[in-house]
């Protein structure tokens, strides 16, 4: 006869004592939701096969069996039922069902117990079950079923005092049922998130009579807690029963899946190596680890191709990111941007050498040896409580990029193999993003280097304007762009101011920009008017587009740039300012209008007649002429300065005019004021995410071996970086303050087409030089005047004019009504002519010719004597 204080069941199919109660939980819809070890041993079905299936699939009899019909009722039931064993045989078992009720008294689930029926189910040896008649009374069976249930069961009265607890519940609470019985729940627990949640739900069920379920964390494990009211026959709530199911395995599996899912969206949001490493640390702390560090090879930070050879020696890495769940604990052994050498026996070096992750902890001698060799790491283990670690290599395309090291100190449980698999997956995704960022860095640096080599590093000396500029490459991931600017000295002390913008980004845009800038300088050297210059430039863009299309067809490759779909597109503004007449002539090819600040403080936008962008072809360009007072400020820019996602171009132009009206002590300050008003400054950029250990990573890029990230500094005169960074599009800004040559600096004579006037002209020029105190250059100037005036009379046409300009140099200009341009030629021994221009070119600093509306002008320039410049 069996003892009543212990249920010992014996399955007729295995002859092994069943010490665990055979219990199951069934939903209101008849689906099995829980399956105990005892039920598995008694009926042979493992939980993985039976949970989630309809309970009627266990029947060995007709579904109308009274046992199953009773489950549709609302009361407790016990009786006999025929159950099918896993091997197909029939078992006649005693069955007890205890319903859980909702607020309306209806059953929303059942706890079902199985036991061999007294007098039935002989085993294969013909022996009877251990339970004899009178031995397995229902009360004892239910008692043992409650006490030995594999889930934590507890019952409270309406005042939330403990009434019953089973063994699992007592183990959870670390006490005994006797110590808790009759005490109110709030008096037996410490105040924390888990206990507050449990108490809140208890009160809710007791007050409303409505069952509930929720998930909680307690003792380092995840629990699914079911609560239901216990009612008397009148429907009054007399207490609350709870069942807590350990769902840790399912919970952590879900957390791992969620972490992997988030990794796809949170890692690699930018093409920045350091930012990608930061994103990995932000994702896993504190959800997987309490401290994470990411170290990369210097070659990765420089955008170079790392070696494919295994790293089999002590490796030097640079710290680019680390993060702690608690500020300063543990203290980082390596500062951001600093380098560290991992000894060959350390877990990080071992994982890099073998190319696979390592799980280590205090039981690993090499781990202990490595930690002991560094005071900071040793303090992290002995004082901060670090007890478990994982070292995972960052590998992509078969290349080792660096290592990520994960530490645990707050969670008592060490890292498990499942955690290592998860960390390896996360590190692999981060490594692909780091490699993409590295390759982008290489291409971006090449494009930016090309772009900057094509831009002026300083402005040439000239007398017409005082100028300053800014150039800020875009902070986007598209790469360097095609914006450019230029200041080109022209003859007669004039100057050309140019800004342009090639659509798109990358090496192709930079190369196209270089071609256009070179073309503009070449055409400007011919002294074409602005509208004609843009016409020639438009033809060049059309030819470049045709050449690109031909190349694509010949090599069979598809277009790799957005420009290729519609050809090259570019805008340009070309302006020529003459300090003698103070006239500025401008023409635009689809470019925004310049702003002008007059000396009286008036700000306006030049009313241009904009032509089409370059590359459209077949449409004319129109020049606009305006007079600028001496000291006027003219501002040329590209659309990246005035356009933004949060404002349209009109709002940008209004803001430009407002900023231009602000008083400024210098052009350099004016440039900074304009950019500060229309673009966010580096100081106003959103802060990089701060580390939980208190150290921000914003400066890691600069520290990390000079690594140039996408937020490259702006270009200022002399190549020094500006404080402005990361505009949405490239920005080129050129600001010029006009000068004027006064009447005492210019002398002009109209000349008749008579060879006899040449001697008188030389005399007038000599007198003007004496008035200017330039007698030292009188001989050469008289010779130049004689040759140029003679050529104009002999080969040109009326009207003929001589002009001398004294500024930084002495300029002699002779104009006539014939547009045919002269050219140098080598005179033969007995030729009477052909030596004049050759002589002029040898005696002067430079000479040239330009077309005018009425003919041409030939000019020659001389250096002034020392002390007169």
Image (cartoon, rainbow, N blue to C red):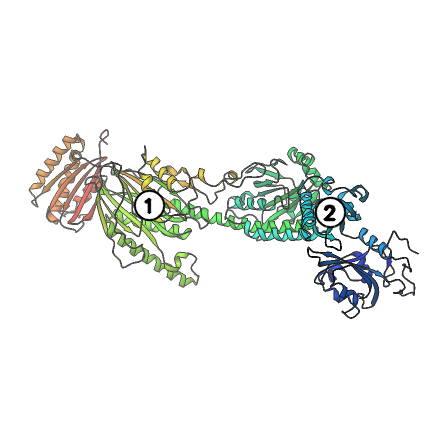
Query: Circle 1 — which element?
Result: helix
Q: Is residue 840 left or right of residue 614?
A: left
Nearer the camera: disc 1 or disc 2: 2
Q: Is residue 106 left or right of residue 863?
A: right
> Depth check: 76 or 771 in front?
76
Q: Quadrant of residue 106?
A: bottom right
Q: Position of residue 570 (x, y in %)?
A: 34, 53
Q: Position of residue 131 (x, y in %)?
A: 89, 59
Q: Quadrant of residue 196?
A: top right
Is the residue marked by circle 2 packed among few (<14), some (14-19), or many (20+) residues within 10 Å? Answer: some
In which quadrant of the rendered image does the N terminus lie? bottom right
> Depth check: 92 or 346 in front?
92
Query: Circle 2 — which element?
Result: loop
Q: Position of residue 750 (x, y in %)?
A: 10, 42
Residue 849 visible in rendering: yes
Q: Which residue is mark 1?
A: 653
Q: Earlier in the sequence, mark 1 or mark 2?
A: 2
How far apart are the two marked residues, 1 and 2, measured between alpha carbons? Answer: 73 Å
Q: Position of residue 307 (x, y in %)?
A: 56, 48
> Depth check: 347 or 728 in front?
728
Q: Which residue is mark 2?
A: 158
Residue 241 visible in rendering: no
Q: Residue furthest right?
A: 1
Q: Residue furthest bottom?
A: 62
Q: Residue furthest top?
A: 867
The label number, if any, that marks residue 607 in the structure image: none
In which quadrant of the rendered image does the C terminus lie? top left
Q: How many marks?
A: 2
Is the residue marked by circle 1 packed among few (<14), some (14-19), or many (20+) residues within 10 Å? Answer: many
Tell me the residue at 17%/51% (across/down): 820
Q: Is residue 451 left or right of residue 346?
A: left
> Depth check: 640 or 57 in front?
57
């Amino acid at each position: 006869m069996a003892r009543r204080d212990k249920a010992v069941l014996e399955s007729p199919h295995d002859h092994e004592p069943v010490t665990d109660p055979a219990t199951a939980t069934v939903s209101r819809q008849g689906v099995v939701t829980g399956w105990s070890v005892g039920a598995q041993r008694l009926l042979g079905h493992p939980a993985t096969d039976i949970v989630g299936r309809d309970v009627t699939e266990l029947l060995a009899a007709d579904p109308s069996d009274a046992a199953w019909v009773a489950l549709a009722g609302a009361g407790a039931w016990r009786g006999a039922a025929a159950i099918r064993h896993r091997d197909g045989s029939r078992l006649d078992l005693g069955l007890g069902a205890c319903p859980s009720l909702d607020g309306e008294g209806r059953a929303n689930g059942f706890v079902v117990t199985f036991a061999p029926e007294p007098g039935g189910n002989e085993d294969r040896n013909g022996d009877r079950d251990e339970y004899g008649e009178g031995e397995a009374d229902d009360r004892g069976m239910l008692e043992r079923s409650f006490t030995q249930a594999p889930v934590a069961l507890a019952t409270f009265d309406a005042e939330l005092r403990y009434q019953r607890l089973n063994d699992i519940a007592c183990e959870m609470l670390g006490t005994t049922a006797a110590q808790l019985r009759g005490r109110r729940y709030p008096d037996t627990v410490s105040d924390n998130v888990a206990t507050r949640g449990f108490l809140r739900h208890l009160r809710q069920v007791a007050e409303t009579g409505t069952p509930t379920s929720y998930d909680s964390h307690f003792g380092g494990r995840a629990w699914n807690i079911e609560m239901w009211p216990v009612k008397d026959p009148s429907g009054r709530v007399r207490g609350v029963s709870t069942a807590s199911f350990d769902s840790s395995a399912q919970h952590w599996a879900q957390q791992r899946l969620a972490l992997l899912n988030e990794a796809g969206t949170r890692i690699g949001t930018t093409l920045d190596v350091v930012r990608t490493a930061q994103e990995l640390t932000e994702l896993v702390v504190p959800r997987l680890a309490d401290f994470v560090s990411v170290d990369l090879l210097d070659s990765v930070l420089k955008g170079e191709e790392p070696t494919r050879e295994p790293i089999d020696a002590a490796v030097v890495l640079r710290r680019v990111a680390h993060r702690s769940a608690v500020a300063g604990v543990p203290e980082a052994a390596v500062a951001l941007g600093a380098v560290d050498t991992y000894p060959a026996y350390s877990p990080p070096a071992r994982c890099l050498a073998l190319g696979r992750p390592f799980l280590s902890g205090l039981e690993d001698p090499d781990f202990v040896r490595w930690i002991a060799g560094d005071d900071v790491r040793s303090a992290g283990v002995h004082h901060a409580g670090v007890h478990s670690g994982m070292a995972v290599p960052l590998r992509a395309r078969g290349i080792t990029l660096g290592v990520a090291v994960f530490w645990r100190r707050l969670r008592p449980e060490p890292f498990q193999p499942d955690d290592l698999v998860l960390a390896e997956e996360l590190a692999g995704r981060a490594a692909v993003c780091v490699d993409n960022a590295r390759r982008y860095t290489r291409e971006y640096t090449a494009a930016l280097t090309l772009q900057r080599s094509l831009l002026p590093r300083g402005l040439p000396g000239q007398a017409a304007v005082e100028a300053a500029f800014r150039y800020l490459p875009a902070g986007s991931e598209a790469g360097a762009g095609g914006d450019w600017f230029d200041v080109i000295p022209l003859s007669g002390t004039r100057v050309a101011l140019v800004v342009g913008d090639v659509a798109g980004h990358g090496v192709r845009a930079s190369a196209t920009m270089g071609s256009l800038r070179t073309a503009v300088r070449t055409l400007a050297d011919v002294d074409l008017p602005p509208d004609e210059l843009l016409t020639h430039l438009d033809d060049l863009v059309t030819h470049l587009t045709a050449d690109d299309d031909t190349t694509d067809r010949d090599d069979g490759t598809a277009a790799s740039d957005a420009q290729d779909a519609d050809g090259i597109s570019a805008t340009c503004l070309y302006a020529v300012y003459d300090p003698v007449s103070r006239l500025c002539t401008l023409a635009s090819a689809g470019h925004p209008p310049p702003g002008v600040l007059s000396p009286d403080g008036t700000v306006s936008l030049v009313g241009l007649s904009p032509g089409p962008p370059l590359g459209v072809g077949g449409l004319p360009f129109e020049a606009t002429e305006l007079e600028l007072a001496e000291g006027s400020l003219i501002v040329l820019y590209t659309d990246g300065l005035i356009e933004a996602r949060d404002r349209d171009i009109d709002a940008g132009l209004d803001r430009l005019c407002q900023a231009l009206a602000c008083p400024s002590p210098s052009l350099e300050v004016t440039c900074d004021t304009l950019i500060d008003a229309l673009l966010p400054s580096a100081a106003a950029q959103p802060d990089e995410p701060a580390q939980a250990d208190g150290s921000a990573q914003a400066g890691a890029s600069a520290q990390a071996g000079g690594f140039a990230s996408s937020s490259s500094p702006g270009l200022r005169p002399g190549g020094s970086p500006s404080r402005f960074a990361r505009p949405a599009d490239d920005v080129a800004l050129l600001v010029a303050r006009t000068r004027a040559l006064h009447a005492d600096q210019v002398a002009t004579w109209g000349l008749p087409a008579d060879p006899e006037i040449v001697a008188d002209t030389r005399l007038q020029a000599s007198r003007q030089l004496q008035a200017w105190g330039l007698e030292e250059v009188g001989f050469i100037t008289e010779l130049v005047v004689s040759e140029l005036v003679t050529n104009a009379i002999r080969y040109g046409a009326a009207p003929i004019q001589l002009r001398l300009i004294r500024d930084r140099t002495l300029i002699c200009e002779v104009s006539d009504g014939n547009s045919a341009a002269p050219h140098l030629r080598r005179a033969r021994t007995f030729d009477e002519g052909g030596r004049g221009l050759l002589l002029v070119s040898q005696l002067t600093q430079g000479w040239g010719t330009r077309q005018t509306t009425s003919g041409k002008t030939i000019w020659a320039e001389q250096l002034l004597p020392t002390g007169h410049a």
